[in-house]
Image: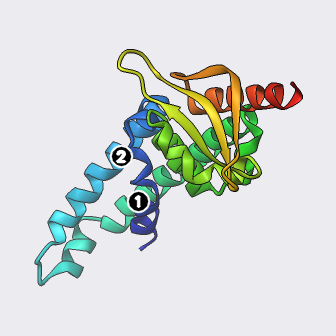
Amino acid sequence: MTCQRNWLHVEPVFNCLEIQRQLPEETKVFSQVISTWKEVTSKLQNRLNALQIIISKRIPEILKNCNKHLEFIKKRLEDYLEMKRMIFPRFYFLSTNELLAILAGSRNPESVQPHLVKCFENVKQLMICKQEIGPSTIRMLMSAEGEGLVLHKKIHVRSAVEQWLANVEKSMFEALKK
């Protein structure tokens, strides 16, 4: 049960290509766990003698080993999220699942929109302009009341999400000072 619970918790994270690219070692270990899990479940599927198979194939030991790998992955994932939070401290206002959703969709700036209010007080929306050629840009912030703050520089959405959000924050401060 523990192995299945841990696997279900971690699996959606590693479905994202961006996170796979940033955590290659953990992705490799998770792939091994997936193949082991599929092998175990295929041995037991539709078997009337499942208990005998579990004992003879040493499945509890295999699952304990998978649990160790999953604990390693979860620890490394927590370290990864902490690093992202240190780069952009406003991520501390987000839950782990919310931050993972943002990082998983880092190529899509729209994925940040639902979480903006937690990162920036009263910023409801980023006005994202999609370009035919090149990355999308951010030109304006919208408040919950519908007020707009035009940024003096357009922010290009092409790097890691924490970097362009830091640029949004910096540009927001500059616009408010002026």
Residue 64 visible in this rendered orientation of the protein: no
**Front residue (pair 90, 3):** 90
Residue 131: % across, % down:
41, 22
Residue 97: % across, % down:
56, 56
Considering the image in quadrants, where does the N terminus appear?
A: bottom left
Q: Quadrant of residue 29?
A: top left
**Residue type at mark 2?**
Asn
**Front residue (pair 19, 63):** 19
Residue pointed to by mark 1: 7
Q: Residue at x 42, y 16 (%)?
A: 134
**Residue type at mark 1?**
Trp
Relative side of 103 to 155, left or right: left
Number of residues whose C-alpha sits closer than 10 Å to that of mark 2, classed few (under 14), some (14–19) or many (20 or more)? few
Above or below residue 137? Residue 41 is: below
Q: Quadrant of residue 88?
A: top right
**Front residue (pair 153, 107):** 153
Q: Secondary structure at mark 1?
A: helix
Residue 48: % across, % down:
12, 84
Residue pointed to by mark 2: 15
